[in-house]
Image (cartoon, grey):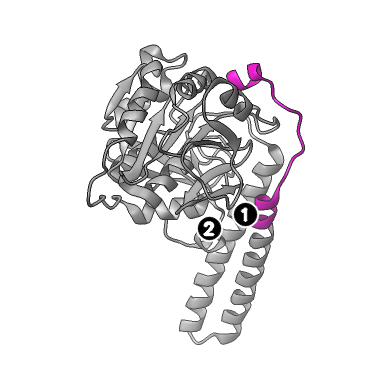
Amino acid sequence: MPAQRIVVIGASAGGVKALSEIARGLPANFAAPVFVVIHVPPESRSILPEILSRRGHLRAKHAEDGERYKAGVIYVAPPDRHMMIHGDTISIERGPREKRHRPAIDPLFRSAATAHSAAVIGVILTGSLDDGTAGLLAIKQGGGIAIVQDPADAIHASMPQSAIENVDVDFTLPVRQISRKLVDLTAHEMPASPRRAARLEVMEMENRISEMEGKTLQDDDRPGQPSAFSCPDCGGVLWEIDDGNYVRFRCRVGPESMLGAQSDVLEEALFSALKTLEESARLSKRLADNERARKHEWLAMRFEARERDARERAEVIRRVLISGTSEVPEANEEELEHA
């Protein structure tokens, strides 16, 4: 019996039709759990699980925080939440938007790669821009398998094309052939010694940022190099990360695609305040260290008090961002299709 694989799928505009085709082709005894992220408006309640359950043989449901996943179930990321994988459980996080989306594809793919390395099969479907490219690259670095919908077969070719141009893709297929390939791959043995993901430390740090983990947000270490660009959400410096031939940008609290999309004004203000307070805390700490080295104890204590105050205020804002909720009307199938 082969070790269990996991399947992660990312889609955007046009994705409901493609996902329905894949769900229709997966048998009731499919030997892996399936995790799906599709870009949906944050103010809408997704009915994608109902659509996939109705059109396929597998049960589909919105993933729940702390839930243990199992083979033969399709887990869908809920609106306005990232879905991530930790060991044999799912976590649902209200971390910062990635590529201007929440849920975003990269957090799911990246967390799957760090948790299960060669066991992961990543699939990128139709969509605009490049969400999923960095995540699919992480899956390949961990020894997993990359499948991409043929751009000529996609309603929107940008996401598949970006993945093909930047990742060593294993299979480029029309959507009607993807489910058959998934069945075949899950029936075969995985490598005896799964490869450790390259850049694992960076991936794990990015996972913690997506989870709004306080210590990581306050840490001075950042992957990449400071760029000349500023974050369109919080105004902070964007860090340029070079993943081989694929260059992307990340601010202190989340990566950006560098292409605009409207975002919530209140959340922008909170993230901007969080960034400012974190920078103030780091500056106060450096000043305290400098004054203590000069034997100016009273000045050092004053700067340390400023640091504590800034970190406490930043922690309050971080908790607000994590706990934010919204009661929203239900999205219909047509709205999902054009998300």
Q: Is residue 198 something that shows in the picture?
A: yes
Which quadrant would residue 32 be assigned to in this image?
top left
Q: Is residue 42 positioned above or below 172 on the image? A: below
| Secondary structure type for disc 1 | helix
Quarter of the image that includes the N terminus? top left
Mark 2 is on which residue type? Answer: Leu
Question: In the rendered view, would you say 240 is above or below 154?
Answer: below
Magenta residues, start to end: 317-339
Relative side of 138 to 54, left or right: left
Q: Is residue 298 magenta?
A: no
Name the residue: 76% across, 29% down.
Answer: 329
Label 1 CA crowd tier, 10 Å (few <14, some 14–19, many 20+): many
Q: Is residue 178 above or below residue 270?
A: above
Callout 1 amino acid: Leu
What residue lies at 41% left-to-right and 28% top-to-bottom? Answer: 124
User: In the drawing, does residue 260 fall left or right of residue 243?
Assistant: right
Q: CA distance from mark 1 to mark 2?
A: 9 Å
**Vertical placement of 196 versus 129: above or below?**
below
Q: Which residue is mark 2?
A: 217
Element assignment for label 2: helix
Tag 1 near tag 2, CB within 8 Å = yes
What residue does disc 1 label? 274
Q: Position of residue 111 (x, y in %)?
A: 44, 47
